[in-house]
Structures are given as structure tokens and as C-alpha cells.
């Protein structure tokens, strides 16, 4: 009986893990550094200041592969933070969240005063809900999973690979929708992606 129950669970885990492995994902260590660097190009620190620090939410789908990657991102941000990385002289405080209904996300992000959200989702329906919330609360959205597709679907900033080199993708319409503004020096370092027609 236990073998019968274990097989579907193992299959779900392997399919989620294979999905992440099949993508060209920038290593979590590099993504953590790029998160710090990207936020350093924000035009006005007040856009991301949560009372003397930057509160970064790391939001993932509720499956083993996504949760594991969210922990990798968290650990690497904490390691960079321990090396005295700062953004506009503000400390970056990351915290984990899991995908939820719109009302729950709104409440959580409002209560925690989240200003930046790193999204780890393979689910387009989840992404739509999340981006609705980032627009309502003026939270800057970022991702490093399904990067080109998620940025095309409305995430503001994505970290990926091109020719085995780190690449920052941006969606200018989304950045504007989330009420954020970067200094001019940032844009030559990025590649602009147009929003997918709805």
C-alpha cells in the first residue's frame, strides 16, 4: 500500500524538479547579487524603503522544487547581506511566502510592508494573481524562473542567461505599473521585453 502512495508523490516531485532543471536558470548566488545591484539603480530609495530597511518577499509555488529554490535564494541573499551588501545604505531583509489567494497575499504584503517581491512560480494563473497584488500595492516584481516568459507576462525585472552570461530582462510597462523608476544608467545594462498582448 505504501509503495502505491509513494509512486505518485515521487512522480510529482520529479516532474517539478525536471521542470526547473530543464530551464536555463541563473544560479541563486548570482541572482542574489543581481537583486542587490538592480535595487541599487532605483531612482529614489523611498520607493523601496520599509522604515529604514528593504523588505523583500520571496514568493513560491507550493511544490518541492520551487520551495527548495526559494530557500536557495533566501540563503544567498542572507550570505550577501552578511558581507555587508546594502542598497542605498538600507539593509535587505528577505522573507519567504507561498502562493495564496489574492486577499491573503494583499493582507500579508500590507502587514509586512513588502516593497520588493521575488516570484518563483511555474503557474500562469498564480502569476496573474500575484501581479494584480504588486500593482495594487506598488511592489516591484522580480523573477529568475521562466524568466523571459514571466517578464513578457508582466513581471518587471527578470534574471536569466544568454550565451551562458547573466542577463537582466525588464518590462518597462510593468515597472511603470508598479510605480517604480530606475536611473538612466540601469537601462543599457538590460534587455527590454514587450508585454505579451492579452
Image: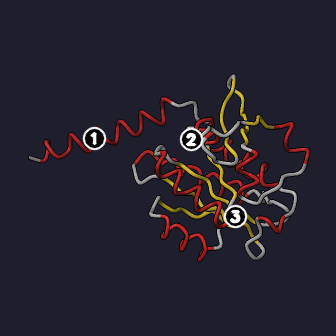
Q: Quick one: label 1 or label 3, which is nearer the N terminus?
A: 1
Q: Is residue 141 above or below residue 186?
A: below
User: Residue placed at 89% from the left, 51% from the top?
Assistant: 183
Position of residue 149 measured from the top left corner of the image (x, y, whole percent): 58, 36
Q: Nearer the viewer, mark 1 or mark 3?
A: 3
Position of residue 85 measured from the top left corner of the image (x, y, whole percent): 78, 57
User: Residue placed at 66% from the left, 40% from the top?
Assistant: 195
Q: Which residue is mark 1?
A: 10
* Image side of residue 79 versus residue 49, left or right: left
- Residue at the far top in the pictured view: 163
Q: Secondary structure at mark 2?
A: loop
- Residue at the far left in the pictured view: 1
Q: Quick one: label 2 or label 3, which is nearer the N terminus?
A: 3
Depth check: give the residue in front, 182 or 171. 171
- Which quadrant: the C terminus? top right
User: Residue placed at 67% from the left, 25% from the top?
Assistant: 164
Q: Real-space Cα distance between discs 2 and 1?
A: 22 Å
Q: Which residue is mark 2?
A: 145
Depth check: give the residue in front, 193 or 29. 193
Q: Secondary structure at mark 1?
A: helix
Q: Is the C-beta separation of discs 1 and 3 under 8 Å?
A: no
For the residue carrying disc 3, how many other residues have a C-alpha within 10 Å: few (<14), some (14-19), or many (20+)?
many
User: Residue placed at 91% from the left, 46% from the top?
Assistant: 184
Q: Is residue 94 above or below residue 167?
A: below
Question: Across the whole image, how many numbered discs are drawn on residues?
Answer: 3
* Image side of residue 112 versus residue 182, left or right: left
Q: Which residue is mark 3?
A: 138
Amino acid at each position: 500500500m505504501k509503495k502505491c502512495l509513494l509512486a505518485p508523490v515521487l512522480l510529482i516531485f520529479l516532474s517539478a524538479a525536471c521542470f526547473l532543471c530543464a530551464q536555463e536558470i541563473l544560479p541563486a548566488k548570482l541572482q542574489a547579487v543581481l537583486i542587490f545591484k538592480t535595487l541599487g539603480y532605483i531612482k529614489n530609495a523611498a520607493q523601496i524603503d520599509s522604515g529604514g530597511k528593504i523588505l523583500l518577499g520571496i514568493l513560491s509555488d507550493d511544490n518541492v522544487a520551487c520551495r527548495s529554490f526559494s530557500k536557495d535564494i533566501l540563503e544567498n541573499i542572507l550570505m550577501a547581506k552578511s558581507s555587508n551588501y546594502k542598497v542605498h545604505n538600507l539593509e535587505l531583509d528577505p522573507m519567504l511566502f507561498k502562493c495564496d489567494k489574492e486577499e491573503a497575499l494583499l493582507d500579508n504584503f500590507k502587514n509586512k510592508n513588502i516593497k520588493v517581491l521575488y516570484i518563483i512560480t511555474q503557474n500562469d494563473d498564480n502569476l496573474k494573481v500575484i501581479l494584480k497584488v504588486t500593482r495594487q500595492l506598488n511592489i516591484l516584481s522580480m523573477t529568475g524562473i521562466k524568466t523571459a516568459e514571466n517578464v513578457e507576462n508582466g513581471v518587471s525585472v527578470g534574471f536569466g542567461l544568454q550565451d551562458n552570461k547573466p542577463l537582466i530582462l525588464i518590462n518597462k510597462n510593468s515597472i511603470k505599473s508598479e510605480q517604480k523608476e530606475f536611473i538612466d544608467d540601469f537601462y543599457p545594462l538590460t534587455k527590454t521585453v514587450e508585454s505579451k498582448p492579452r
